[in-house]
């Protein structure tokens, strides 16, 4: 496949081959890390390329995904939700049914197998809501590797059940008090650990962002979501869906769902960002709709930043979405017009959370609720003959306290 | 490009057979006025070159002291434009001491590479170190800086093998900054016995003077490094003086300058008093 493609949507068909050899998606991506890490980044890149080309690696991963993670996850027809909105059929891709309760484990399983292959003996990870931290702690327990999870102190406080889970799984949870003490600061601290412990440590980044090869690697590991949707849609619908929609923080579940469909021009790819208190306020986490291009955490992408290039804190009711950046491939799909990006406020997400509970008997993660909140709009736009797939990226048990608090209920 | 001020300074140091001392201080820390007083006082306190930290919200290679200093600078209202103005004010009093900015890419990218290079040159900046911009990503920035005759100073580290050093050395000018420990600033200690062969490798690969930083906090350590490097950089120790002054409700400027003098005196005396005995390179802290 050619490494450069014309930057028009029409030219995407059968020619989408990003990232390029430098790990760039158009102007986005790249490897913006301190020099100390550059040799490791190159080593990781080579190791991942070799693993990707090795059928035994994929076979090993597939085995764990089936028997440990519990894949394939169902593509479930949400009948009552469909009736409720009166538009296209709504299908839920049930990543909430994975072991550990979210899509994060897909990526962690791939990366821990790679870390083992590279002979690394210590794992670090960052986490926001705690889902990626739990998934990292889980695979570390499974393979007997010590694990340190960096988590903002504010997130530690609001995600206590996940903190306890990580500890039960044998991980050390390091509360980060720098900055606003949320996901961005946890990622800074994980980078600092990595730069200090270069020889033995593998950093499992939880989203499709960071220095190359992470954005493409995490996307590849999460693409199991989109590949399954494709096969399941053929089987259950008899054709490809009209749209695939997912929530976006860093955007790993979304890029995993979207990537296998990029060359299928008839399939709309929709990402939903967190609008927090509203895009017209400073309190949101919509980097694509409310930010501009910049460099943070190893990649160039859309960022929330002030006029001086200082990074702003994202806000969202969902601890998994309040990140001031977004994966570089989303930035590129946004500019190309191949991805459509919408947003959902805290209040809309809370409402969608309750709607899914009541209509389908499924408690969704607050992250996933951001995608669900746009279900009505998109389903009605597609109309009755259409089919809309929404990625239910995780289950909402971890969010019960947050939701109760916002509804004024004391537990 | 011209690296006149940097080259002249290293030539002078060579003629005097001593290592240079390079204090790092943070822009706007603890206030613009005090930061300017500190800058103005540095040459007399023994600074041969100056590194001025650019405040950034997410400094991923810094330890807690410089993270906190950056936040103080930002809180004091410092911006990249404000820092260039600060340098211009410093240049009114000093035309000879090379001044190198050190920071992260995003504020520079936000400012615009060409505009930044032009304004930095105009303010009297001699070079810039961009911690999160490795050679692979430096092309456009490097071109803009070249056009404005501002040096892009590269970093070499303990993880840089000979092949990597070639990549780092290509197109660099002024000097090379050797990061003496794998890690963030102000946490681990540099070990002179390990630094010496690394400095030699970097010198060979680049043909440029080598400044050594990260992990130098005491006069003793500074003196050890001064025996093997062309220049010694220290930073966390000075921003810690600012923090301590604020805590004690004392003026920051004299405390910082006194500490700079202590380390620079040690650097200046290092080679004159150096026993040619490797025992001296052993841990002293």
Image (cartoon, coloured by chain):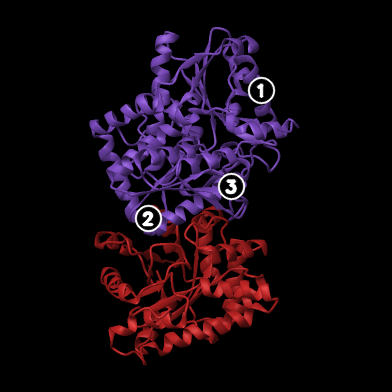
Residue A339 image point, x, y percent: 50, 28
At x 41%, y 57%, the residue is: A195
Question: What is the secondary structure assignment of the residue under circle 1?
Answer: helix
Q: CA distance from mark 3 to mark 1?
A: 26 Å
Placement of the C terminus of chain B among the 4 image quadrants:
bottom left
- For label 2, the SS is helix
Query: Could you tell me residue B202's position as x and y percent?
Result: 30, 69
- The quadrant of the picture occupied by the N terminus of chain B is bottom left
Left or right of B152 in this view: A314: right
- Choose the circle earlier in sequence order: 3 or 1: 3
Q: Is residue B85 left or right of residue B100?
A: right
Q: Which residue is mark 2?
A: A37
Label 2 vs label 3: CA separation? Answer: 24 Å
Tell me whether circle 3 and circle 1 mark residues in contact (CB < 8 Å). no
Which circle marks residue A354 in the picture? 1
Does residue A69 appear in this view? Answer: yes
Give the distance between the C-alpha atoms of the residues marked 1 and 2, in whole angstroms: 45 Å
* Image: A384 above or below A51: above
Chain ID, purple in image: A
Q: State whether discs 2 and 3 lie on one chain.
A: yes
Residue B276 screen position, x and y as percent: 28, 88
Q: Are marks 1 and 2 on the same chain?
A: yes
């Amino acid at each position: 496949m050619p490494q450069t493609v014309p930057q028009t949507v029409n030219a995407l068909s059968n020619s989408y081959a990003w990232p390029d050899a430098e790990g760039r998606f158009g102007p986005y991506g790249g490897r913006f890390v301190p020099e100390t890490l550059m040799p490791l980044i190159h080593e990781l890149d080579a190791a991942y390329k070799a693993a990707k080309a090795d059928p035994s690696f994929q076979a090993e991963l597939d085995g764990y995904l089936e028997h440990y993670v519990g894949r394939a996850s169902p593509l479930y027809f949400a009948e009552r939700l469909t009736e409720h909105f009166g538009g296209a059929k709504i299908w839920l891709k049930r990543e909430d049914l994975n072991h550990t309760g979210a899509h994060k484990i897909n990526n962690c399983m791939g990366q821990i197998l790679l870390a083992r292959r590279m002979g690394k003996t210590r794992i670090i990870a960052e986490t926001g809501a705690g889902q990626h931290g739990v998934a990292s702690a889980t695979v570390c327990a499974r393979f007997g590797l010590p694990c340190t999870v960096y988590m903002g102190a504010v997130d530690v406080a609001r995600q206590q059940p996940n903190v306890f889970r990580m500890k039960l799984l044998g991980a050390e949870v390091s509360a980060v008090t720098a900055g606003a003490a949320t996901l961005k600061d946890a990622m800074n601290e994980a980078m600092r650990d990595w730069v200090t412990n270069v020889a033995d440590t593998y950093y499992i980044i939880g989203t499709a962002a960071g220095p190359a090869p992470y954005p493409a690697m995490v996307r590849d590991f999460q693409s199991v979501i989109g590949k399954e949707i494709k096969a399941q849609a053929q089987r259950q619908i008899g054709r490809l869906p009209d749209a695939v929609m997912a929530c976006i923080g860093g955007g790993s579940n979304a890029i995993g769902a979207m990537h296998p469909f990029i060359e299928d021009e008839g399939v709309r790819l929709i990402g939903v960002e967190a609008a927090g208190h509203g895009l017209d306020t400073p309190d949101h986490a919509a980097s694509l709709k409310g930010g501009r291009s910049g460099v943070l955490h190893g990649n160039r992408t859309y960022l929330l930043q002030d006029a001086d290039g200082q990074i702003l804190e994202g806000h969202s009711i969902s601890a998994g979405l309040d990140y001031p950046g977004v994966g570089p491939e989303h930035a590129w799909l946004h500019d190309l017009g191949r991805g459509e990006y919408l947003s959902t406020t805290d209040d809309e997400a809370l409402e969608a959370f309750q709607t899914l509970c009541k209509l389908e008997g499924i408690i969704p993660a607050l992250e996933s609720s951001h995608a669900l909140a746009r279900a009505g709009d998109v389903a009605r736009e597609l109309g009755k003959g259409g089919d809309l797939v929404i990625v239910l990226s995780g289950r909402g048990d971890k969010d019960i306290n947050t939701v109760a608090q916002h509804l004024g209920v004391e537990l | 490009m011209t690296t006149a001020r940097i080259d002249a300074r290293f030539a002078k140091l060579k003629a005097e057979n001593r290592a240079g001392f390079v204090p790092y201080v943070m822009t706007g820390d603890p206030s613009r006025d005090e930061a300017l007083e500190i800058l103005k006082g540095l040459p007399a306190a023994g600074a041969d070159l100056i590194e001025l930290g650019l405040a950034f919200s997410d400094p991923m290679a810094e330890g807690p002291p410089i993270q906190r200093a950056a936040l103080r600078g930002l809180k004091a209202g410092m911006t990249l434009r404000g820092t260039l103005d600060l340098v211009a004010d410093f240049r009114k009093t000093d035309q000879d001491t090379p001044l190198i900015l050190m920071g992260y890419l995003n504020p520079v990218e936000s400012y615009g590479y060409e505009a930044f290079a032009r304004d930095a040159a105009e303010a009297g900046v001699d070079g810039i170190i961009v911690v999160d911009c490795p050679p692979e990503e430096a092309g456009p920035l490097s071109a803009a800086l070249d056009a404005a005759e501002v040096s892009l100073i590269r970093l070499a580290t303990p993880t840089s093998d000979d092949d990597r050093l070639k990549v780092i050395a290509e197109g660099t000018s002024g000097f090379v900054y050797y990061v003496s420990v794998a890690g963030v600033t102000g946490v681990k200690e540099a070990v002179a016995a390990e630094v010496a062969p690394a400095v030699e490798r970097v010198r060979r690969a680049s043909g440029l003077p080598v400044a050594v930083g990260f992990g130098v906090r005491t006069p003793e350590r500074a003196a050890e490094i001064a025996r093997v490097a062309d220049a010694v950089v220290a930073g966390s120790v000075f921003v810690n003086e600012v923090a301590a002054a604020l805590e004690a409700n004392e003026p920051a400027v004299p405390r910082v300058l006194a500490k700079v003098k202590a380390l620079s005196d040690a650097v200046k005396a290092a080679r004159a008093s150096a026993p040619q005995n490797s025992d001296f390179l052993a841990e002293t802290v």
